[in-house]
Amino acid sequence: GKIRKPKNFVCTISDDRGEEATYAGYPISSVATPDTGKTIGDVVSLLWFKKVYPRWAVDFIETVIKTVADHGPAVSGAHNAKVTARAGKSVVESLVTGLLTIGPRFGGAIDGAAKYFKYAHDNNMSPAEFLNYMKKQGIPIPGIGHRIKSVRNPDKRVEGLKKFAAENFPATPLLEYALEVEKLTTSKKDNLILNVDGTIGILMVDMWRALGYTEEEIDEFIESGTLNSFFILGRTIGFIGHILDEKRLGMPMYRHPFDDILYDVQKAEEIK
Ligand code: ACO
Ligand code: LMR
């Protein structure tokens, strides 16, 4: 009989063997050109979720990507990318240094926000119980807090995402819970708002529930880092913009000014 060669790789999202490569079974031409009416949101739903999401969900994904594309030059990732570009490195080298800052403090609190708020809501914790629970975990609540945005200087991106959800989502139970938590955190300190990461993570859970995913499937998305991926994807647009900006401007190598560093080094004779 025929002996099948054991396979080293498995691929369930795309196929390049035919006349035309496919995204989850859909030929690229059926999603790529403007006349198909398909957007980047559709491509993400095919390649990340292997599903054709309804229009409101595709539009939400698209809105998220556009919303997180950039937030100026001063944030961790853009700063790293700019410094690296100015050290004469390539686009891809500069880009990865920016991407590497995405994590629990910057842009990568989306999975964590989904995880902890979902857990609290599923277990009927009151906002006060949730705050207590997070204190015991010993970590800041992912999705809460911002360096420059606050109750007095609201984040328009968060308002935009909440408006989109109010107008398009069938229901937003986790967002409603998160807003109750936000009331409590902002009563303690006015920059402890539900931030853009938190809003995205929480609304993605509401979206997946509305799309009929099981709790296990949603937990798997969270554990595998799916939610942070929306930030990684979107912010790549901005980082590349900053890198090209540096190259066009022909900026020299960056060196940080002495007067912005507190030098607090012991003298050799003080060190035993
Ligand atoms: N949960 C609970 N308490 C918090 C939180 C939080 N998420 N964030 C800050 N605090 C508290 C701190 O414990 C601290 O309290 P203290 O003064 O009693 O010591 C106080 O608020 C100030 O904390 P800082 O770390 O100085 O706050 P900062 O404004 O520098 O931090 C940051 C901003 C890093 C975003 C922080 O709020 C945080 O870690 N949040 C959670 C992670 C997160 O959601 N990151 C995504 C931000 S949005 C984005 O990057 C696109
Ligand atoms: C961002 O989107 O990069 C920000 O919310 C972080 C910041 O400090 O502005």
Image: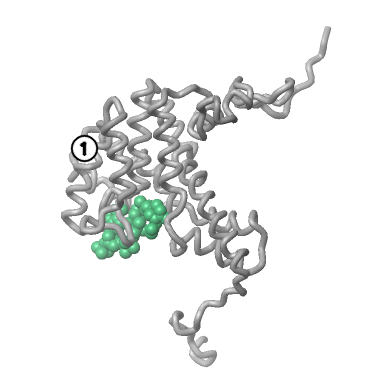
Residue drawn 40% across and 48% down?
Answer: 109
> Residue 138: x and y, percent?
32, 53
> Would residue 250 be seen by someone viewing this image from the given angle?
yes
**Quadrant of ligand 2 in image:** bottom left
Of all residues shown, which one is farthest toward the right?
A: 1
Residue drawn 34% across and 24% down?
Answer: 210
Of all residues shown, which one is farthest toward the front?
A: 35
> Residue 2: x and y, percent?
82, 10
> What's the residue type where badge 1 is placed?
Met
Front position in the image: 96 or 162: 162
User: Which quarter of the rendered picture does the N terminus lie within?
Assistant: top right
Residue 181 placement, left or right of 16: left
**Circle 1 — which element?**
loop
Q: Where 2 falls versus 185 (above or below)?
A: above
Per the image, the residue denoted by label 1 is 125
> Residue 236: x and y, percent?
53, 49
> Residue 169: x and y, percent?
31, 28
